Amino acid sequence: MWKTTQTISSTMDASEDVTLDFGEEDEIDRRRHLKHPVAVFFHVMFRTSAILAYLFCGWFSSSFITNFVLIVILLSMDFWTVKNITGRLLVGLRWWNYVDDDGVSHWVYESRKGAHQKKITAAEARIFWLSLVACQVIWIVFFFGTLFTLNFKWFMVVLVGTIMNGANVYGYIRCKYGSKKKLTSVATGFLGRQLWKSMTTPEPEEQSSQK
């Protein structure tokens, strides 16, 4: 059974997709082996290559245009791979877009629910989310680094990396937690639990005085 969340936005280019069966993240196979080693490899390889190319491309070429094109190609390959392949294979999630007959763009966020034969391994899910979030943090650090140093030439490269990786981060978080309202409730619940914990946990001095 599919669990689908749709949002309607302004008219945008259409992207077609085919509904495929994939595993669900609620029922995780706790074994540590990888069921999709090729998908895991390319999931990590493209995004790591883009970051390494940004850091060390100056060692191999002094042409900014060449370095820019190389990094953007790696980022594009990573974006397409994560959005269309590794997301549905490694964590059982998918987000996509289509345009209806009225020219209205619909954004669809899907997650597989219910019993299914193919389960997701905990190792694959962990690799997917860690690499997705960690790379976004790295690109954000690069973003502020180029901004504070006024390195506007590389600012555009970092901006492309931040936006493209951030789109996948946002899309898959929406798939996992549902609508914006549910995302807000999740964040509010977490902050509420942390606040309640800080209020109810006695200080070390108070604990020692009670003894």
Image (tube, rainbow, N blue to C red):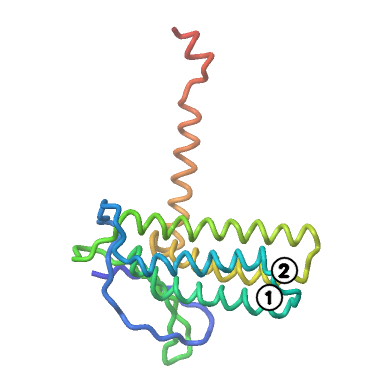
Q: Of helix, strand and loop, which one carries label 1?
A: helix
- Give the vertical position of 12 relative to 196 (above or below): below
Residue 82 occupies quadrant? bottom left
The residue carrying mark 2 is: 58
Mark 1 crowd level (few <14, some 14–19, many ≥20, 10 Å Cα): some
Q: Mark 1–mark 2 contact, CB under 8 Å?
A: yes
- Residue 125, position in %: x, y? 36, 58
The percent coordinates of residue 96 (x first, y second) are 42, 77
Can you say which quadrant of the picture contains the C terminus? top left
To which quarter of the image does residue 74 belong? bottom right
Farthest right residue? 150
Measured Cα–Cα span from mark 1 to mark 2: 8 Å
Image location (x, y in percent) of residue 66: 69, 79
Q: Seen from this angle, which residue lies furthest front?
A: 60
At x 70% / y 72%, what residue is drawn?
156
* Res. 96 mark: none
Q: Which numbered disc, 1 or 2, marks the residue closer to the eye?
A: 2
Kind of residue sitting beneath label 2:
Gly
Circle 2 Cα neighbour tier, 10 Å, few/some/many (<14 / 14–19 / ≥20): few
Q: Is residue 107 left or right of residue 11?
A: left
On the image, numbered disc 1 is attached to which residue? 67
Residue at 30 percent across and 67 percent down: it is 3
Q: Residue at x 33, y 68 (%)?
A: 89
Q: Is residue 5 visible?
A: no
Residue 102 in sight: yes
Q: Residue 85, how many percent across, how many down?
A: 39, 74
Question: Who comes first in sequence, dot 1 or dot 2?
Answer: 2
Amino acid type, label 1: Asn
- The N terminus appears in which quarter of the rendering? bottom left
Residue drawn at x 48%, y 37% is 194
In the image: residue 172, left or right of residue 51: left
Q: Which of 195 and 70 is in front in this view?
A: 70
